[in-house]
Image (cartoon, helix red, strand yellow):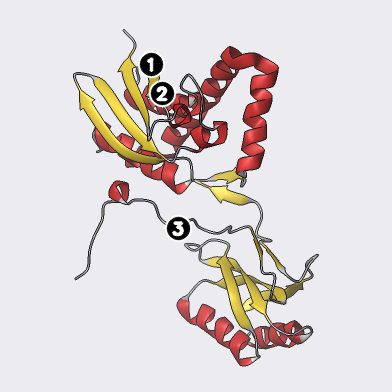
């Protein structure tokens, strides 16, 4: 029997391996970029078939825009050295794309995504690893002190939350306050920030529980006070725009303090 699960009730899943950079230590890879091809199922099938018939094995296929009408498509192919030229020629013979390029990579075991920049919700995004974020947070605390870092990270979050609202506000017109926050939680999970566990609204106060919060994970365990200042700012900035009121967001439980969750309490300013 088919089972349905609500997005917010979905527990932990296997992490998505990088869409930007992957390492295949036991394979020899070639990279082919098919430029300006009409995005329909038959075209994609024909290109993929041409690769297979020529002796290549598709390891990765990335469209520049899955919903676009004319797109670029990146293929990372396992094949013997030199076969990529034959594969590219076969694709060219289909006469479906403006051009077909064999991209010479710095290492034949690396799959690097040449589709650049990375667009997220209409804006340019970048992939930041935990090590980079850890250095960023540590540097802020070293330069500004704990109080200064708290204010700085919160202000960044305010801007982030406001920008998310502006991007999706057309989707919020018919939604309740609770469902608007849940949609924000879905987007944050999709971006790898945290996982929203619950939303409760009582007497004008909002309580939110979140799991797998990257900010708390980076700071680490053993803290004596809540550490998710950026996340607080995101919720505050989003609510400020959504309700046209100013909100105070306080973290009362934090994974960085050893809790199994982060818990935020939100109240509008008087």
Residue 220 sits in which quadrant?
top right
Q: Could you tell me which quadrant the C terminus lies in? A: top left
Q: Residue furthest top?
A: 270
Q: Which residue is mark 2?
A: 236
Q: Residue 77 vs residue 195: left or right?
A: right
Q: Residue at x 34, y 51 (%)?
A: 11
**What is the distance, in whole Å, between disc 1 and disc 3 at their CAs?**
34 Å
**What is the distance, in whole Å, between disc 1 and disc 2 at their CAs?**
7 Å
Q: Residue 141 vs residue 188: left or right?
A: right
Camera-side residue of 225 and 242: 225
Residue 77, label in figure: none
Q: Looking at the image, tell me whether mark 1 or mark 3 is earlier in sequence order.
A: 3
- Callout 1 secondary element: strand
Residue 14, label in figure: 3
- Near mark 3 (Cα within 10 A), the count class, few <14, some 14-19 or many ≥20, is few
- Callout 2 secondary element: helix
**What is the distance, in whole Å, between disc 3 and disc 2 at their CAs?**
30 Å
Q: Looking at the image, tell me whether mark 3 or mark 2 is earlier in sequence order.
A: 3
Judged by depth in the image, the label closer to the viewer, 1 or 3, is 3
Camera-side residue of 106 and 261: 261
Do the residues under discs 1 and 3 have CB atoms within 8 angstroms? no
Q: Which residue is mark 1?
A: 248
């Amino acid at each position: 029997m088919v089972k349905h699960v609500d997005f917010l009730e979905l527990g932990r899943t296997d992490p998505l391996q990088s869409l930007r950079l992957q390492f295949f230590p036991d394979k020899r890879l070639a990279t082919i970029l098919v430029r300006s091809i009409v995005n329909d199922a038959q075209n994609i099938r024909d290109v993929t078939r041409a690769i297979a018939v020529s002796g290549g094995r598709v390891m990765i296929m990335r469209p520049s825009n899955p919903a676009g009408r004319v797109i670029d498509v990146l293929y990372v192919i396992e094949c013997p050295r030199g076969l990529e030229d034959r594969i590219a020629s076969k694709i060219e013979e289909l006469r479906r794309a403006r051009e077909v390029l064999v991209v010479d990579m710095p290492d034949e075991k690396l799959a690097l995504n040449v589709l650049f920049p990375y667009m997220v919700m209409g804006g340019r995004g970048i992939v930041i690893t935990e090590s980079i974020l850890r250095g960023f947070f540590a540097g802020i605390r070293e330069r500004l002190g704990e109080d200064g870092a708290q204010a700085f990270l919160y202000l960044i979050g305010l801007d982030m939350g406001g920008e998310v609202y502006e991007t999706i506000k057309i989707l919020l017109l018919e939604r309740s306050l609770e469902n608007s926050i849940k949609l924000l939680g879905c987007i944050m999970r999709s971006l790898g920030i945290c996982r929203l566990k619950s939303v409760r609204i009582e007497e004008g106060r909002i309580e939110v529980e979140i799991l797998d919060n990257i900010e708390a994970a980076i700071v680490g365990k053993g803290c004596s006070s809540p550490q998710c200042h950026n996340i607080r700012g995101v919720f505050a900035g989003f609510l400020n725009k959504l309700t046209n009121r100013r909100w105070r967001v306080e973290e009362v439980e934090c994974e960085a303090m050893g809790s199994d969750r982060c818990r935020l309490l939100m109240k509008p300013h008087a």
